[in-house]
Amino acid sequence: MRLWLRNENPPELRRAPSFLKAFLRALTVVGLPLLVLAPFASVGGAAPHHGLTPVATALPNSRLTAGATLVGSSSLVSPNGQYRLDMEADGNLVLYREGRPLWASGTSGHPGTVAAMQGDGNFVIYQGHRAIWSSNTSRGGNSAYYLVVLADGNVVIYTPANRPIWATNTSDTGTRTLPSSAAARSSLNAAHRGGHP
């Protein structure tokens, strides 16, 4: 990987639209750090697991879009900063409120796992190529489903039409109207045993 100094003009930037060049220069002038994500093919690296894009740990976000993953020690953070969904190095996905755990996937003991928001609407934790947990929300196809950590403490998967299809049911308002992780876990366990939920 090659790092470009501020006064260098990388070949990729020469092809960029002029408004983008001006925007990047403006950010450099005010001293804001930039993180530019490029397709793996353009930098010569290998594609990540399942061809999904890892979320950078340095830039917490509240949303995980279809095709993106959370890897060990990365997080999603609610807009108000009170809630944090951590993909822990031991393989457990845990939702915290100001450091106190509220919900967990129960997948500890599986280091190297990856949590993937898939284009079919399913949110899956993989160890290698094996699913060890799932939201059981596959709708087929490949679309713009997304998972978001809300300011009320709920983690929700939404359809491209912005309809909720799954939640951790950890809202501080106490409402529980969506399928929960317990139902998804029992469905996945039944599938691993060769049965049906």
Image (spheres, rainbow, N blue to C red):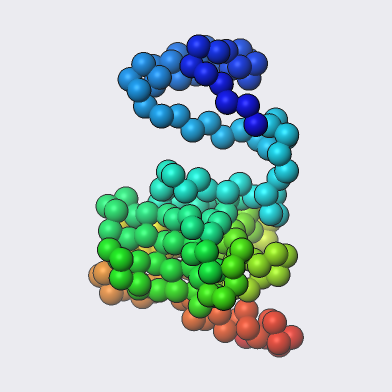
Q: Quadrant of residue 113?
A: bottom right
Percent position (x, y) of residue 124? Answer: 60, 65
Side (left or right) of 167 relative to 131: left
Name above or below for residue 61 compared with residue 140.
Answer: above
> Which quarter of the rendered picture does the C terminus lie within?
bottom right
Residue at x 50%, y 74% (from the top left corner): 105
Question: Residue 4 versus residue 170: which sits nearer the camera?
Answer: 4
Can residue 19 be spotted in the picture?
no
Residue at x 35%, y 23% (from the top left corner): 31
Residue at x 65%, y 85% (from the top left corner): 190
Side (left or right) of 62 relative to 97: right
Q: Quadrant of residue 34?
A: top left
Percent position (x, y) of residue 117? Answer: 57, 57
Name above or below for residue 49 compared with residue 3.
Answer: below
Residue at x 37%, y 27% (from the top left corner): 32
Percent position (x, y) of residue 69? Answer: 57, 54
